[in-house]
Amino acid sequence: MRLASPQANGGLQILRRGFSYTDGIDEGGLLDAGLFFIAFQRDPEHFITLQRRLGTHDALNEYIKHVGSGVWAVPPGLPDDTRTWADHLFA
């Protein structure tokens, strides 16, 4: 948290949340558990900048196994007078 804070990154801020999960026992007899991480930011480069910083300075890296990631565009909510996304996009 400290390394990802805006104070440690020149004001760079993302909204982030982690969700723990447990999915039973894997084939090797080990607990299949982890952390699902979701973040919202205006520019994906912000997340890349933070990840690069954490990748070189975070003492917990030896316990982390990255499985996958993705980037999705999440548009803002609809105005009260709009019925569908098409109404808003093509007005």
Image (cartoon, helix red, strand yellow):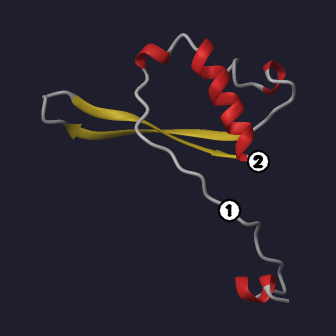
Quarter assignment of residue 21: top left
- Horizontal side of 26 relative to 21 (left or right) equals left
- Horizontal side of 8 relative to 64 (left or right) equals right
Earlier sequence position, callout 2 versus callout 1: 2
Q: Residue at x 13, y 29 (%)?
A: 28
Residue 42 appears anywhere in the view: yes
Mark 1 is surrounded, within 10 Å at the Cα level, by few (under 14), some (14 to 19) or many (20 or more) other residues, namely few
Label annotation for residue 5: none
Q: Amino acid at mark 1?
A: Val
Which secondary structure, mark 2?
loop
Residue 84 appears anywhere in the view: no
Quarter assignment of residue 75: bottom right
Q: Position of residue 71 (x, y in %)?
A: 59, 52
Is the C terminus in the top left, top right, bottom left or bottom right quadrant? bottom right
Q: Residue at x 43, y 14 (%)?
A: 62
Q: Position of residue 7 (x, y in %)?
A: 83, 21
- Horizontal side of 63 relative to 86 (left or right) equals left
Which secondary structure, mark 1?
loop
The CA distance from mark 2 to mark 1 is: 12 Å
Q: Is residue 26 above or below residue 74?
A: above
The residue at which mark 1 appears reads as 74
Q: Position of residue 61 (x, y in %)?
A: 49, 17
Q: Residue at x 83, y 81 (%)?
A: 80
Q: Residue at x 18, y 36 (%)?
A: 26
Label annotation for residue 43: 2
Mark 2 is surrounded, within 10 Å at the Cα level, by few (under 14), some (14 to 19) or many (20 or more) other residues, namely few
